[in-house]
Amino acid sequence: MKILVAGCCGFVGAALCQALRELVADAGLAGFDNLMRPGAELNRRRMRSLGVQFFHADARAASDIAGLPPADWVIDAAAIPDVRAGLAQDSASLMEHNIAGTVHLLEYCRRHGAGLLLLSSSRVYSIPALRSVPLRAENGAFCVDASATLPHGVSAAGIGPEFSTQPPVSLYGASKLAAERLALEYGAAFRFPVWVTRCGILAGAGQFGTPRQGIIAYWIHAHRRRRPLRYTGFGGTGFQTRDIFHPRDLAALLVRQIRSGCPPEPRVWHAGGGAANAISLRRLTDWCDGRFGPHPVASDPAEPPFDVPWVVMDCKAAETELGWRPRIGLDEILEEIARHAESHPEWLEISQA
């Protein structure tokens, strides 16, 4: 079996390659990346050490993708993953990466009869609908108010795939929704398997953290470096809550999808840490204070565009039908990042070069 990883030098793509090497040791692994992200060149060397055949290619260029060797499965981890992307001068670039790039991969799958594992996002859901979910504050974090009437697709376990995707979802969310729909249509038209997995926040050592993406890694690295930090929006409390999980757990799900072949029907799957791995920025600060010593965080009540107070992924379908659930706990993920921050004090400069 041959697997091609798009975006193999990003944090998620590189971590997936390492995990796949362990989970399916006999698979032939190849990957490509355009190396545009600061720090990506470091993961190019990592690909060599893992025995991954590397290609310098850009998903936006159809000729680059057409020149890649055939594979049985493609993992699409190549995208701009920033919910605020496209707000300035780069709207067209966002669409080129997240829609046109996916189309070129779908054409590759059509030509070679390969299956596609499309990594999508928890941020495809309606922003007004997310902001209207009944919440309560508890121990420095927002959580679902189970005593209230909850909207369709929400439970104490989190958001299900049936939750509203009505606009606005952000330009980024719209690009991922469009990529999902195109992937499912291509799979149906040309009869190759397509798995769409909407992911919660992925986090772990080696993530390129910035305030706009990789927020968990950024917060830990910045706290240890005593960089200025700020809670923004929702009263400036830092109660905004997300669920996080590790790329190794995602890799385990992708392997189950590959081994299952075609999904039971064209459907969308959830992968995330769930309620057990949910954390707010306030609780993350408390954890960092205990790990590195106290560090003050400023407060700014101004509401940033597209931010939401709470997103937790309900992954019960993946557990029921594929026997998957995340195995790596919240504290283990945070400690892994903290150790990386201690051994790589220059990481913020690498991430933001």
Image (cartoon, rainbow, N blue to C red):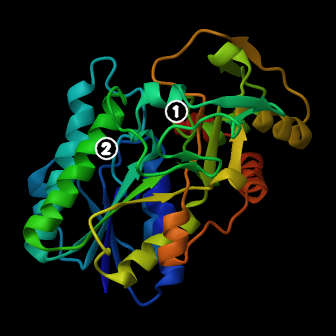
Which mark, residue 352? 1
Report if the CB atoms under discs 2 and 1 are less than 8 Å apart: no
Viewer-nearest of discs 2 and 1: 2
**At which x and y percent is residue 143?**
70, 37
Q: Quadrant of residue 141?
A: top right
Q: What residue is drawn where x is 47% and y is 87%? A: 25
Q: Is residue 65 visible to us here?
A: no
Between the C-alphas of marks 2 and 1, the distance is 24 Å
Q: Is residue 144 visible to us here?
A: yes
User: Mark 1: which secondary structure?
Assistant: loop
In the drawing, does residue 4 fall left or right of residue 14?
Answer: left
| Type of amino acid under label 1 | Gln
Looking at the image, residue 177 lies above or below residue 90: below
| Type of amino acid under label 2 | Lys
Of 147 and 305, nearer the camera is 147
Looking at the image, residue 173 lies above or below residue 21: above
Of 55 and 262, nearer the camera is 262
Q: What residue is drawn where x is 9% and y is 70%? A: 190
Which mark, residue 176? 2
Q: Quadrant of the N terminus?
A: bottom left
Looking at the image, residue 161 lies above or below residue 136: below
In the drawing, does residue 30 fall left or right of residue 306?
Answer: left
Looking at the image, residue 264 lies above or below residue 284: below
**At which x and y percent is residue 41?**
43, 52
